[in-house]
Image (tube, rainbow, N blue to C red):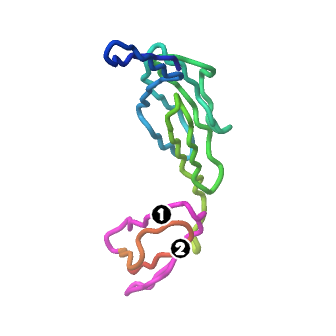
């Protein structure tokens, strides 16, 4: 951040206005979404070369390769660690006074009950229980043209689907 000043002319008088800590910055992108496995990302900070800025409000699951006060146009590289929790993680970082949001998908591991089914040769219907954490989306797609999903074919968290053959 730096100081800027300007003047106002009033007849023969001169009035000076000074503004401290003036800085304008722009982030590209303003948001990033990661899978639960984590990964790396880059943020382009566009600011005047006189403009000093820093990164703040960084949670322990996000690591920047550079830290401390910086200035001007910079590309920040960061790493997001694996999310082993069954819920979405969100962080609102403060970079050069601008918000940057990191969202990470949950670890979605679960199981089905039953794991398999045997049907009569003529026709059959069955229901399968899906056991997943609440923030985990699922979608059912038949792997053969003689299997039909009757309800529902998608959901979030624990649920069930019914199919016919």
Residue reaching furthest to the front:
12
Where is residue 10, by image quadrant? top left
Residue at mark 1: 138
- Range drawn in magenta: 117-146
* Depicted 60 relative to depicted 118: above or below: above
Where is residue 44, by image quadrant? top left
* Most foreground residue, 13 or 7: 13
Q: Are marks 2 and 1 in contact (CB under 8 Å)?
A: yes
For residue 151, side relative to residue 96 (left or right) = left
Relative image position of residue 159 (x, y in whole percent):
53, 73
- Look at the magenta stretch and give its main secondary structure: loop
Give the structural element (helix, strand or loop) at label 2. Answer: strand
* Depicted 117 relative to depicted 13: above or below: below
Relative image position of residue 131 (x, y in whole percent):
59, 68
* Most foreground residue, 88 or 43: 43
Where is residue 153, by image quadrant? bottom left
Relative image position of residue 31 (x, y in whole percent):
46, 40
* Most foreground residue, 127 or 18: 18
* Depicted 17 relative to depicted 26: above or below: above
Looking at the image, how many numbered discs can be counted on the residues?
2
* Most foreground residue, 74 or 80: 74
Residue at mark 2: 159
Give the structural element (helix, strand or loop) at label 1. Answer: strand
Instruction: Tell me which residue sits at (59%, 52%) in the image.
Output: 107
Residue reaching furthest to the right:
60
Q: Badge 1: few (under 14), some or many (20 or more) residues near its Cα, within 10 Å?
A: some
Relative image position of residue 148 (x, y in whole percent):
36, 75
Q: Quadrant of the C terminus?
A: bottom left
Among numbered discs 2 and 1, the one appearing first in the sequence? 1
The stretch drawn in magenta includes residue 99: no
Q: Badge 2: few (under 14), some or many (20 or more) residues near its Cα, within 10 Å?
A: some
Instruction: Tell me which residue sits at (37%, 74%) in the image.
Output: 147
């Amino acid at each position: 951040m730096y100081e800027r000043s300007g003047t106002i002319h009033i007849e023969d008088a001169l009035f000076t206005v000074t503004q401290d800590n003036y800085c304008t910055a722009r982030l590209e992108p303003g948001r990033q979404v990661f899978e639960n496995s984590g990964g790396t990302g880059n943020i382009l900070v566009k600011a005047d070369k006189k403009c000093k800025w820093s990164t703040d409000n960084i949670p322990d699951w996000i690591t920047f390769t550079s830290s401390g006060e910086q200035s001007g146009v910079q590309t920040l590289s960061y790493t997001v660690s694996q999310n082993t929790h069954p819920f979405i993680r969100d962080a609102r970082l403060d970079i050069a006074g601008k918000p940057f949001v990191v969202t990470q998908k949950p670890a979605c591991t679960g199981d089905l009950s039953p794991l398999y089914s045997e049907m009569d040769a003529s026709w059959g219907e069955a229901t399968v229980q899906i056991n997943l954490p609440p923030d985990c989306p699922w979608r059912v797609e038949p792997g053969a043209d003689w299997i039909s999903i009757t309800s529902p074919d998608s959901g979030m968290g624990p649920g069930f689907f019914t199919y016919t053959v």
